[in-house]
Image (cartoon, rainbow, N blue to C red):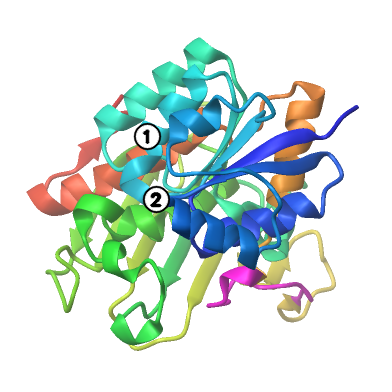
Amino acid sequence: MSPYGVAIWGSGYVAGEHVRAYRANSQARIVALGSRTLEGARAKAQQWGLDCPVYDDLEKLLANPEVDIVSVCTPNDQHARDAIAIARAGKHILIEKPPATDLDSLRAMGDAVRRAGVKTLVGFVLRWNPLLQTAKALVDDGALGRIVMAQVDYWHHIGRDAGLPMYHWLVQKEHSGGIFLAGGSHAVDAARWLVGEEVIEVFGYASGPSGDYDYPPTVVGLLRFAGRGGRAGAIARVSACVEANIPYVFNLDLLGEDGSLRGNRLWSRKLPGQTGWAEIPTIMPDSGDVSHHPFQGEIDHFLQCIATGVESPLNLEDGIKTAEVCLAVEQSAATGQPVRLPLL
């Protein structure tokens, strides 16, 4: 079978990681690159060693008959507009998280994808992190039993001195959607995935605007899950903080009836002779360098889903649920009231 033609829409650092991962998979070949300006697209094509057409217009890129898949690597507030256009053109879509920054956009892009019938993946890349995959395997194997409580944190100093290329728009809620969507959504997605239930109610707390941020850069959410089989659902605390002076930290705690996981340390009834926490050698998600994130696993998975006609568990429909939780936490923090889900 001929490789799928891939277009990268957006030319920031994350786009470069997509380029790297697609190039390493024989099922794909990069056939187009788009950016805000032709000059910028040409410069990135040269930097990444790409020999393909470049565009500053998404519709023109989509008219290229060689394009089968588009990776959306634009700023957060542009994801919905871009994904809707791509879906209407009949192309499969990998959307960097978060899928959108407001409920109306989430609804519109969901409708467009359902009508088009294209395959989608939302880029919660930490699902391919070895620690999180180990945690998921332990949960599925029953090593922890029913999860009763979870705690997941995204803490990362992201100030002017961090030198992030996207900093100028990340600090503006209009473009980023707020830190709970922009970064904390990793924690919410991990909690949803590992607990294995849907969130039915949230309460949120937030700091005030700080530094260059025109929105609260510290947010804590309390989540209640639905439960199953007549049993009460789990509860969770998730947080995002980017104003503290701290290296990147991604805390993960899962407390279950038959065992618990704290980071890479396990305590379980499945280890009857256990006298202390068992430490699992693995790769933790706590790296401030985005190149350590497992983009290869994510993109290999998406290409395989397309090749086999299988819907990814991390498709747009699932990504919308994570975004809903994030928006509900922000709404609760602003109103001081709990928010019931779903919102759509």
Taking 186 as reference, is 242 left or right? left
Q: Residue at x 41, y 75 (%)?
A: 164
Query: Could you tell me if residue 332 is visible in this image?
Result: yes
The vertical placement of 287 against 89, above or below, is below
Taking the view exactly as shown, the residue that stands out farthest to the top is 115
The vertical placement of 92 against 184, above or below, is above
The vertical placement of 57 against 1, above or below, is below
* Magenta stretch bounds: 279-291
Residue 25 x/y as whole percent: 82, 48
Residue 101 x/y as whole percent: 30, 43
Q: Amino acid at mark 1?
A: Ala
| Residue 281, magenta (yes or no) | yes
Which residue is label 1 attached to? 80
The vertical placement of 77 against 180, above or below, is above
Q: Viewer-nearest of labels 1 and 2?
A: 2
Which residue is label 2 attached to? 36
